[in-house]
Amino acid sequence: MRQCPPHGHSCSVSGPNRAVSVFWSIRIHLNLMTQAVILSAYLSFESSSWPPGGIKAQWKLAIAAMSGQTVTIPDDRAFASFKAECLCEEGWSLRYSKLGITVWSQDLEEGKSVHKIKCQMVCKDVSAETMYDVLHDIEYRKKWDTNVIETFDIGKLTVNADVGYYSWKCPSPLKNRDVITLRSWLPIAKDYIIMNYSVKHAKYPPKKEMVRAVSLQTGYMVQWQGPNRCILTYLAQVDPRGSLPKWVVNRSSHYFAPRAMKKINKACLKYPEWKQRHNPCFKPWLYPEQTTLPSIPLSELSIQRAESLEKIDESSLAETQDREADSD
């Protein structure tokens, strides 16, 4: 069996592997995106204030840069701002903390419907490299994640930026959501960042059976904590484009988000063995020469404005007895 080089080294792939359908981008993780959608709708009825200091200013600058009229690819400053906000402790309201998993929320501005959530998990027996691979490997996610409806890549922008479509199941009886995002990723020393924001593409308009959510900025930070240990932080600023029922809100921070984090951790534990049997050297997120995605110009994209999308009211929907068949 071929041995893959460690992260940061070249891996040459030829022959049949070149014909493999290349899915080298990860969309917003479905369960955590659901969590972001839920808390965003709920927190519009609450208010809190930003902490004073530079983190607020840095975050607003990053959001402003990605909410202009022109689509741009995040630069080093945007990644630095995202990392700083992941590490910031001030101004967050604690929602859940148990067994190494913590969930916080934060309002951006009083009276606005868009808010931020942050989930963090200490991962024992999982390396930062494995976590990064699992977050990228779309083929593996199809094996362990039951809520993905459809995901595909539209095209690449640079060696570490692409555009893709992603749709996922929401808790019944809510309508399912989808997004089109510009995603970029960057290793920083031994840590990794993956982040995205919503864009529009003329060939992929909103679907009647879906609610198109808007990611203002969403992403992951994976922190190296040793050869076999890491910390995963998920940070999201999302507009769900709808009012959600209270029963969904009540379960969001205490069930949906922690459960999603646990599923990621379990998937990481099983990934090395799975990957050894499924194209072990095929990792386009590490080796961009492996991708066959077409290049697309930024001119084909525009910023997805939340106000241009339909906003639905699901606040009166009753809870059903539907539950996912898989368990934690």
Image (spheres, rainbow, N blue to C red):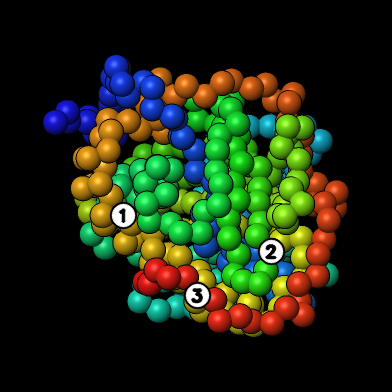
Task: Choose the circle earlier in sequence order: 2 or 1.
Answer: 2
| Residue assigned mark 3 | 323
Task: Choose the circle earlier in sequence order: 3 or 2.
Answer: 2
**x%, y% of residue 66?**
71, 41
Q: Is residue 215 left or right of residue 147?
A: right
Residue 261: image quadrant is bottom left
Residue 220's tag is none
Badge 1 density bin: few <14, some 14–19, many ≥20, Cα 10 Å: many
Q: Amino acid at mark 3?
A: Arg
Q: How many marks?
A: 3
Task: Choose the circle earlier in sequence order: 1 or 3.
Answer: 1
Residue 181: image quadrant is top right
Q: Name the quarter where the N terminus is drawn.
A: top left
Please give the name of the residue rendered at 49% of the width and 51% of the height, measured from the top-left corner: 220
Please give the name of the residue rendered at 41% of the width and 33% of the height, measured from the top-left corner: 285
| Residue assigned mark 2 | 175
**x%, y% of residue 86?**
52, 57
Residue 319 versus residue 35 in the image, above or below: below
Give the farthest residue toward the top: 15
Q: Nearer the viewer, mark 1 or mark 3?
A: 3
| Residue assigned mark 1 | 268
Do we see residue 43 in this rendering? no
**x%, y% of residue 102?**
46, 72
Q: Name the quarter where the C terminus is drawn.
A: bottom left
Q: CA distance from mark 1 to mark 3?
A: 23 Å
Q: Nearer the viewer, residue 261 or 147?
A: 147
Please give the name of the residue rendered at 77% of the width and 65% of the height, measured from the top-left corner: 242
Q: Is residue 139 left or right of residue 10?
A: right
Q: Amino acid at mark 2?
A: Lys
